[in-house]
Structures are given as C-alpha cells and as structure tokens.
Image (cartoon, rainbow, N blue to C red):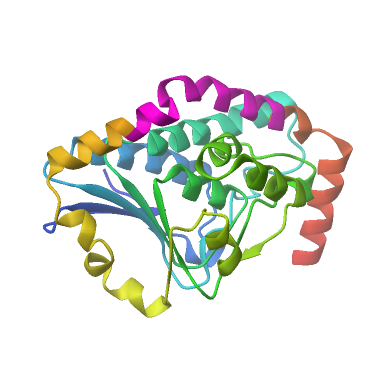
Amino acid sequence: MTYETITYEVFPAGYARITLNRPEKMNAVSKQMTSELSQALAEAKKADGIKCLVITGNGDRAFCSGGDLKDLHGDLDASEAFQTLYPMKEVVYQLASFPLPTIALLNGQARGGGCEIATACDIRYAVKDASYGFVQGKLGITPGWGGGVLLYEKIRPEYAFQWLIEAEMYDSDRVAAIGWAHRLIEREELANVEELLAKFLEKSVKQMRVWKKQYDKKLSMLSMSPVMDEEVRTCSRLWESEEHKEAVKRFMTRRS
C-alpha cells in the first residue's frame, strides 16, 4: 500500500516504525491517516522477525496534536461524531493490543488524541523540551478514541483522574513523575533509534511475544474494547453540547 499521511518501514535490526507524517499540521489525525494507520498496523502484525513496533512523528514540533478539525469540527451531531471518532478508536485498540511491545518516541508535544495514541503504546520515551496533555476537557468533551480508559490502566488512577479533569499540558518532568513517560530523552537521541531500542532488540521475537501476551493479560485487553467503545459514545454525546461548540469557535478564532 502507498501511504501519504504516514510512513511505514521495517528495519533489518528487528523493528518496524510508523511515522505520523503531516508536520505542517502538527501531525494531526485525519480520516485518511486513520485508514492508513489501520493498514500499517495490520501490515506490521504480519511482518517477520520484528521484535517491537515504534510510532513517532515527523518534525520537531509535535508527535501529534490530536484530531484534524477539518474532519472533527464542532458542527457534528452525536451520531456523526461517533461515526467519525469510532474508526480511530479501533486504531488505538489495534495499537494497544499489538502482539509485540510498542514504543512511542515522542519527538515533540502531544495533545488530546496525540496523548491517546501515545498511551496506547506500552512504553513512552519523551523529549525533555516538550509538553503533553489530555486537553479535551478544555473543549467541553472527554477523550474520544478510548485513550482515557487506557490512561487509567497505564498510570495510577488518581493521577489519570486529575490529568483528565485539569486538562492541562504537563511538562516532561511531570509526565515522568506520574509514570506516563518511562524515559526522558534529549532531542539529539532521536537520531539513533536503534541505540534507544537496544534493550528491546537484543531479545528474541519469542521472548517479546511472551512478555507482551502477559502484559495484555494483566491489562485484560480482551475486555477493554467495549469499555473504550463506551468512551467514544460518551464523547459523541458531548460533541453536540453548547460547551463544545463554543470552545471550538474560540479555538478557531484564536487560530485565525
């Protein structure tokens, strides 16, 4: 398949990499990107000899700024919002349940849905000079791709609860302190991915599959999908609220 909004590569060292490739849009997720991510994850799942999957963003500004407002605009009703959000929830679940370890290399800021994608990964390496936030609460909604559900599983629930309600961007020290970022890195380290992945790449494929299967069992991934579905439905109902419509208008006014 030819990809336009992402790149997908498999490396001889034993890993695959998906790069969100809309740097001019801060790697915002469009409908096309959603479709391409789903295809790339399916392709990576069948790849021979890989020990882990990396997801990162192009450029030095953003890992991902969330959903593209051209597709996820404020005029959608609840049904339209659900139909637009749900395919990306399926992608997030594909990523969360991938049969090998997944590593988010956060090359820049992640906000909103970008944090949902990162949270779906098993390990997060974050550059020190960026900020990260589940900011959906400032827009009168909640996470819409199932990432809020995953956040409660990945860090202490009281920290997840606070972050979702505050809807603030946290600096790198804070996301490390709450356990969301497993390692803080200098931007220069992104140039040598294989060095960052050394501890993963020295293991066998069989080992990595066993460890990921154990982790999935601990997280009860098989039962997680319907809970994530409910988060999408909840967000969709909030989408047509006046609070959300006004928040989107304010955001678009500031941007223009």
53 vs 187: above or below: above
Magenta span includes 233: yes
Question: Residue 91: percent from the left, percent from the top?
Answer: 44, 36
Which residue is rendered at x = 75% and y = 35% of the image? 239
Q: Nearer the viewer, residue 104 or 36?
A: 104
Which residue is rendered at x = 69% and y = 23% of the image? 79
Side of 160 where 225 appears, left or right:
left
27 vs 216: above or below: below
**View extreme (bottom): residue:** 188
73 vs 14: above or below: above
Which residue is rendered at x = 83% and y = 52% of the image? 249
Q: Quadrant of residue 57?
A: bottom left
Question: Residue 216: percent from the left, percent from the top?
Answer: 36, 31
- The rendered magenta stretch, by its main secondary structure, is classed as helix
- Please give the range of residues in magenta: 215-235
Question: Residue 117: percent from the left, percent from the top?
Answer: 49, 46
Which residue is rendered at x = 68% and y = 50% of the image? 163
Q: Nearer the viewer, residue 52 or 67?
A: 52
Side of 9 where 256 appears, left or right:
right
Magenta span includes 170: no
* Picture quarter with the C terminus: bottom right
158 vs 215: above or below: below
Question: Residue 136: percent from the left, percent from the top?
Answer: 70, 47
Side of 188 where 231 appears, left or right:
right
Q: Quadrant of residue 173?
A: bottom right
Residue 4 shows in the view: no
